[in-house]
Amino acid sequence: MSRGGARGITHGWRASLIAALVTLTSESAAAQTAASCAGSALDANSAPRWTAPLDRTVSLHARDISLREALDRVAVAARIRLSYVAEFLPLDKSVCAAYRDTPAGSALSALLRGTGVERVVIGTEQVVLAPTRKIGRPDSSGSTSRAPAMLDRVVVTGSATEASARGLPIALEVLGGRRIGEHATTSISESLNGAVPGLWVWEQSPTSLVTRYGSVRGASSFGLTYPKVYVDGIQVANPLLLTQLTPESVERVEIIRGPQGAALYGADAISGVVNIVTRHDGTDSGSPEVTLRSGLGLSGSSFVGRPALMQDHAFVARTGTDLQAADLSVTVGTLGAVTPGSYSREINAIGGLRFVWPSLSVSGTARFLRHAASEGTSPLLQQALPPRSDSMPRGLSLDGPALQSVTQYTVGGRATFTPDERWTHSVLVGVDGYRLSDVTLDGTPIPSAVDSALRAARGGADRVSVRASSVYQMPRSAAVATTLTFAAEHSILRDESTVDVPQAPGNTGRGFVSGVADVAFLSNSGIVAQVNSAIYDRLYLTGGLRVERNDGFSNAMRVATLPMLGASFVHDEGAVTVKFRAAFGKGIRPARTPTRNIAWYGVGHSRISADLAPEEQTGIEEGVDLFLGRAVALHLTRFDQLASGLIQQVPVTTDYPDNGGGMQPQLSYALQNVGEITNRGWEAEGAVSTGALSLGATLSLVDSRVRRLANGYTGDLTPGARVLDVPATTIGANATWRVPGWSATLGLSRASDWVGYDRIALADAFSRANGSLQGFVGPQLRGYWHSYDGATHLRASGSREVRPGVFFTVIGDNLLDAQRGEPDNLTIVPGRTVTAGVRLSF
């Protein structure tokens, strides 16, 4: 056993919501002053008599920590070993623990009240938490909980340290590792699409080395929309290079959509934040446990003569208790030719350590990934382009298969110290980096975001991050509880890119020299102050401000202020819980970022204009959440955001030296601020759990349009035009059926209705241009805009326990065999894929 687009909401509606909050707050709420800490503040005088080892006394003071953390600290203080099954307990539920010379039995009774488990003493040191009655099914996050626990779960993405999600004014999505494992998803797109409303990741071939985000509540940049990504709180150097998740090592994934998270996480969190929290747990016995997984499959393709062989293997080892634990997960995957000459090889390893003491906990994370792939030769370009010749325009080619590779790593750790019930201090130190080489491009004149991102990654980067925070719990009255958060953060990034520079006239070649290194150092520092107040544990008010100095701002002003304001109201009526929430935030992305520095055609630091303004996004979200016991959860969110200064790669004509010593016009690219765009829409999500069956669905409606053009913009966008490559509608549905020995899942996702380039027509026209480039710059490019309807992705998996610890699994991916049409007519993804495998645990 292991632990496991219409206009925004009218001002009248907003005023009504605020009035309702004020009215509801004025109701008598003395009974709602939750005994979160009062009920757990036990002492020896009020405790019953306990037998050994439950008679050992503990003293512990902690507020708003997870049940898992509280159990661990009690076990350390009492010098006992606790054993339990994660599915039987709401381990991520927020609890308060205030014990003074209290017997461990009484402390455990207070923490476990209502969970349906009892304490069973085995031997002189071990206590087993065993179920006493039928317990609820796990919720959508992968944890069993009563209705309030859905709001009470502890998260780290919305605060500097772990805190209850109940009062958060933002729509924070939490995907549990168990859900990711049951659905047998490994790629970012498979895991997030259809499960997180408002966010869409384009399906990519496994030979691609990047993740391409189509929408995070619309567009936060042209061609390179992406959230800020963390692994255990350590910022990754290039978020687009994180393409895979390892289900065995993921505890949960926390996602913020929109700029509200920037007040805490700083610049580049303009569209949201994704924090991947890995597992750091031991085993119930403290002895080593090993899991082996192996699968073989075939992936169909309309472009090669036979199906491609797919392999997926994993080794997972854990040892120790929850107080001192170590784990290691290694996965290996391969894929054969889906297009002529393509293949993919990947190895991913992640490990961790965790130590817990009564007032201190320390955890460490290490991650390594190596991905080598060949895109091969595009059969679609072969049909569209003539044979390669010296007269072919620069940037247009049919190069044969070439190996491209990426290496990534993350190393870091966090320490949390709680000296008393008032203060919680946390320090995090981490390093993340990557190296990527030998990137191939499809050769079309208007590069896709995939090409841009791959060019961005030529070279490498290393980011060192240090973050310290302190949370102070002010003395609590009968009505108000307030916490103050102070945080400071500093990071230094060494960014090395490979750029193309003009060749001296008279030299042989195509006029460019490749491989010139551009090395730069970027640093940013931020300080954060945040206040959170709870009034009668019903009305929650949040205000925060981050002041950040960032070298990425290209002008003289390198300081930005990022505010966030929010309010939420939670009402419990028996098994029904309703929550109203509203939040405002501002995010900013510097013109110079690790991704953009060389993102578009090798543009280095020196080529980013000093007058290029940063991208900004401000906006408000409003929503309501409804919970009906353990069975039903409904969420509805409306967002209205204004993005200004968004940067686009605009095609222009530039004279370059040719082989004869003269100058020849070539297609080049300039980074330009577009102006303003509006991102508006609705997000809806629902989940139903009844018995062995759990159902979920999401719907997102997004309207992302150009509002105003900036002076000097020369691209193809016009006021009122839709932003390219942003789907207007995304939907998702999933079902999970689970009984002893059997489990099955079915998932559907679809993005539809977006405008993008007809990239095949562009390639064909460019090959026939005979040196004339005027049709590929400015408004003329609108002639190549194309409307895409989208494709439906259907995925299913099943598992059967044939004997204890031995499972047979079958996974079917892309069952509708959609290989083209997303996000453009040149991208090819693997067709229908069926994998069978075995999982052994011992």
Image: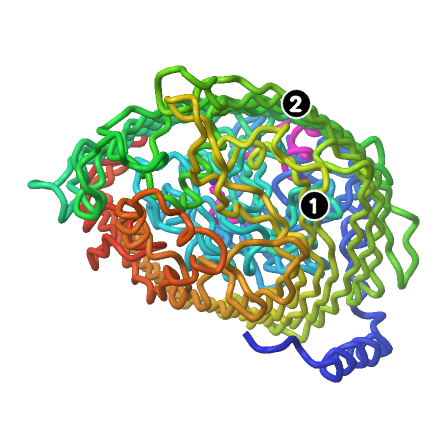
Residue 674 in which image quadrant:
bottom right
SS for callout 1 = loop
> Where is residue 557, by image quadrant?
top right
Range drawn in magenta: 70-89
Point out residue 706 in the picture as x, y percentages from the top left corner: 58, 65
Q: Which residue is mark 1?
A: 614
Q: Position of residue 835 (x, y in %)?
A: 19, 42
**Residue 804 included in the magenta stretch of the image:** no
Name the dominant secondary structure of the magenta segment: helix
Q: Position of residue 112 (x, y in %)?
A: 62, 49
Q: Quadrant of the C terminus?
A: top left
User: Disc number at residue 464?
Assistant: 2
The percent position of residue 452, horizontal first and vertical second, equals 45, 39
| Nearer-the-camera pick, 787 or 93 | 787
Which amino acid, mark 1? Pro
Answer with mark 2 or mark 1, whichever residue precedes in sequence. Answer: 2
Q: Is residue 815 above or below residue 208?
A: below
Q: Which residue is painted at 65% across and 49% down in the image?
A: 270
Q: Residues within 10 Å of mark 2 (few under 14, many from 20)?
A: many
Callout in the foreground (2, 1): 1
Amino acid type for the residue under numbered disc 2: Val
Magenta stretch containing residue 79, yes or no? yes
- Report the side of 443 relative to 301 (left or right): right
Measure how far apart labels 2 and 1 are at the Cα level. 23 Å
Q: Secondary structure at mark 2?
A: strand
Q: Is residue 797 above or below residue 525?
A: below
Tally of numbered tags: 2
